[in-house]
Image (cartoon, rainbow, N blue to C red):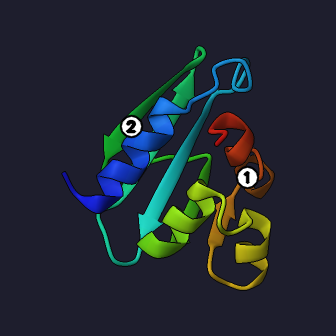
Amino acid sequence: MSEAKAVFESMLGRFDADEADDMEAVFQFDLDDADNYHLIIADGKCVMVEGENDDPTVTLSMDLDTLKEVMSGELDGMAAFMQGKIRAEGDIMLSTKLTQIFPL
C-alpha cells in the first residue's frame, strides 16, 4: 500500500457520519509527490477513489508530508493554507470542515 493510500485509509477509519450528515461533496487531493485521490461524501458515507474526479467540489493541492501533518493534527490546516503549503480551488469553505469530518 502506498504511503498516500495509507493516509486516506486512516481518514476513512475516522470518518464522522454525523458531522457529514447532509453533505454531498467531492474532495479532490492533488498530491505533488504521490498518487492523487478523491473522497466522495454522500448519504452519510465516505468513499475513497484513486485518481481524479471530473467535477470536484473542492480541490486541495499539497505534498504528502503536508497532508500527513494536517491529518495527524501536527499542522493546522488553515495555517498551512496561509503559509502556501496548501492550495485550494472551488468551495474553499468546505475544506475548513475536514478536521470535523475526520476528527483525530
Q: Residue at x 48, y 58 (%)?
A: 29
In the displayed orientation, state which residue is furthest to the top. Answer: 43
In the displayed orientation, state which residue is furthest to the left. Answer: 1
The quarter of the picture where the C terminus appears is: top right
Q: Is residue 61 above or below residue 104?
A: below
- Whichever of labels 2 and 1 marks the residue nearer the N terminus, that label is 2
Q: Position of residue 83 (x, y in %)?
A: 73, 85
Q: Which residue is mark 1?
A: 91
Q: Type of residue at label 1? A: Asp
Q: Is residue 85 above or below residue 37?
A: below
Q: Is residue 36 above or below residue 13?
A: below
Q: Nearer the viewer, mark 2 or mark 1?
A: 2
Q: Residue at x 38, y 40 (%)?
A: 9
Q: Type of residue at label 2? A: Met
Are dots 2 and 1 in contact, CB under 8 Å? no
Q: Is residue 47 visible?
A: yes
Q: Is residue 85 left or right of residue 38?
A: right
Q: Which residue is mark 2?
A: 48
Q: In which image quadrant can residue 47 be found? A: top left
Which is nearer the eye, 92 or 86?
86
- Label 1 crowd (10 A; few <14 / some 14-19 / many >=20): some
